[in-house]
Image (cartoon, helix red, strand yellow):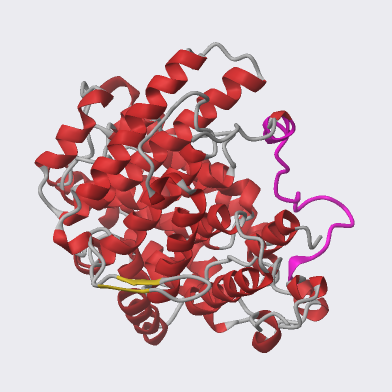
């Protein structure tokens, strides 16, 4: 059984080198982002309503497909200026680590230095742009709404328990928590005034600025939380730009998936976003942080399986699924660039086939060796998609990523490869399970991380009933979580031929 390689991607490969940048705030005649509120209908009913069920092509023209722009946050000149300031801070911090690249941030060894920096903050370390009551509101929202999806692969709940405790003595981290929570609150509740999240975002950056020479896990955590805020309402073509600073920071500090403690939790939070960015590129790019940098220094990639297996926990087995999916994007990107652009990366036909077979075996091994926590507790066969229920948070997204990686590989199955016949060799089998997992499991973090798998799976369906259910699902995810997701509806409508 074989599948042809996808159509040439040269146009997309060339286009990514000319990615559009956010509008220049200083451009004369540019639209004032705050005027969007007077020109766009932000009524929640219209924003998240289900598509017309008439079955006509027009029923899939989603009014919410561009909803990520409608609150104006990502186009605000103040946000764009602050985002560039944070980006410069991240690269400067990464560059400051170059002479001692092998060392990771160390909280204990920097305590005195941190206290000195904080107590010399002009005596106003805790003067906030918001009231104590608003602090409590956003902290409560962080603990109940935001932290669970940051912790979805972490049974220790680092973001829910440890990060807020660390933030009590670290203003930059404290304001990063509040800023992310405020942004999520505004997005989910349709708040038309984004000033709380913007002011908190700017305050967090201001508190980071004096810490340029401080290598501490709390600095890294604050930077990743602010990156999450940016990703929540960023344009798809801007995702990599938002991630580049954190990638440089992890690389320079030598932070990886086995760093232990807070840094390990922060790494995997970033890693899932990096993977989403690779999936958005549709096979033309892999992650910003090379898969080899996800492992401890000196560890060869061929030993990754043993490394993950030695950490006997469902969380790390779930993280292994993230790693394998990244390996799939890396293989596809290498092959695409070798074939389409003539890039000398060694991904010849023979090498590609060898890497493909090895990765396929690793994925099937991941599936067969899942711990009991990652197995479904119930599967209900229904149309158009089965409902597959899990009770462990890490099981939801990790199983989706397994199916996603399999689809990516099956789309480029090398000619001449023959495998034992099984349902796993059919992309549609995997696609139905991706959709079924999201339908049956309402955990917010896993819903956020399902958008790109749903996009990859959704392209394979041809019946209007399947299209309708996927559109309803994507709209409900944005309504439930506040993450900008509906832009993928427009992409799917184009893939289905409605546009």
| Side of 53 where 427 appears, left or right | left
Q: Residue 435 location, x and y as percent?
A: 48, 65
Q: Is residue 143 visible?
A: yes
Q: Say if 346 sits above or below 353 in the image.
A: above
- The foreground one among 85 and 373 is 373
Q: Residue at x 49, y 35 (%)?
A: 1
Q: Say if 262 sits above or below 101 in the image.
A: below
Q: Residue 171 location, x and y as percent?
A: 32, 62
Q: Say if 342 sits above or below 140 in the image.
A: above
| Side of 31 where 246 appears, left or right | left
Q: Residue at x 59, y 42 (%)?
A: 282
User: Is 279 a magenta residue?
Assistant: no
Q: Say if 380 sits above or below 285 in the image.
A: below
Q: Residue 266 location, x and y as percent?
A: 29, 51
Q: Is residue 274 visible?
A: no
Residue span colored magenta: 11-34
For residue 56, what is the image quadrant? bottom right
The mark tally for this picture is: 0
| Side of 157 where 28 appears, left or right | right
For residue 306, what is the image quadrant? top left
- The foreground one among 466 and 30 is 466
């Amino acid at each position: 059984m074989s599948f042809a390689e996808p159509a040439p991607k040269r146009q997309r490969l060339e286009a990514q080198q000319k990615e559009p940048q956010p509008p220049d705030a200083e451009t004369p005649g540019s639209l004032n982002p705050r005027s969007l509120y007077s020109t766009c209908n932000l009524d929640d009913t219209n924003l998240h309503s289900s598509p017309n069920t008439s079955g006509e092509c027009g029923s899939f023209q989603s009014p919410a497909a561009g909803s990520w722009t409608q609150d104006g946050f990502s186009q605000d000149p103040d946000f764009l200026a602050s985002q560039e300031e944070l980006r410069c801070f991240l690269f400067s911090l990464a560059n400051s680590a170059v002479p001692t690249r092998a060392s990771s941030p160390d909280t204990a060894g920097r305590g005195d230095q941190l206290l000195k920096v904080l107590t010399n903050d002009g005596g106003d370390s805790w003067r906030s742009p918001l009231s104590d009551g608003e602090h409590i509101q956003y902290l409560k929202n962080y603990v109940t709404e935001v932290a669970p999806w940051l912790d979805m692969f972490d049974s220790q709940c680092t973001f829910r328990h440890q990060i807020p405790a660390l933030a009590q003595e670290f203003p930059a981290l404290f304001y990063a928590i509040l800023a992310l929570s405020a942004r999520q609150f505004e997005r989910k509740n349709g708040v038309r005034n984004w000033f709380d999240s913007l002011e908190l975002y700017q305050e967090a950056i201001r508190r980071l600025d004096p810490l340029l020479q401080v290598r501490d896990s709390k600095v890294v955590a604050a930077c990743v939380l602010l990156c999450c805020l940016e990703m929540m309402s960023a344009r798809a073509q801007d995702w990599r730009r938002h991630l580049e600073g954190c990638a440089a920071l992890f690389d320079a500090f030598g932070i990886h998936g086995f760093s232990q403690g807070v840094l390990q939790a922060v790494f995997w939070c970033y890693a899932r976003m990096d993977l989403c960015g690779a999936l958005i590129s549709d096979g033309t790019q892999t992650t910003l942080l090379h898969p080899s940098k996800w492992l401890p220094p000196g560890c060869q990639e061929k030993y990754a399986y043993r490394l993950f297996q030695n950490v006997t926990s469902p969380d790390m087995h779930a993280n292994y699924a993230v790693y394998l999916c990244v390996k799939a994007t890396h293989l596809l990107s290498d092959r695409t660039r070798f074939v389409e652009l003539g890039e000398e990366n060694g991904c010849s036909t023979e090498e590609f086939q060898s890497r493909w077979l090895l990765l396929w075996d690793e994925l099937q091994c991941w599936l067969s060796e899942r711990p009991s926590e990652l197995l479904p507790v119930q599967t209900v066969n229904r149309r158009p998609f089965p409902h597959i229920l899990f009770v462990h948070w890490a099981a939801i997204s990790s199983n989706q990523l397994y199916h996603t990686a399999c689809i990516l590989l099956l789309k480029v199955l090398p000619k001449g490869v023959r495998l034992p016949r099984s349902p796993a060799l059919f992309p549609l089998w995997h696609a139905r399970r991706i959709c079924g997992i999201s339908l049956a499991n309402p955990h917010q973090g896993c819903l956020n991380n399902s958008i790109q798998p749903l996009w990859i799976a959704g392209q394979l369906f041809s019946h209007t009933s399947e299209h309708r259910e996927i559109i309803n699902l994507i709209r409900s995810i944005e309504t439930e979580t506040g993450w900008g997701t509906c832009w993928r509806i427009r992409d799917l409508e184009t893939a289905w031929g409605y546009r």
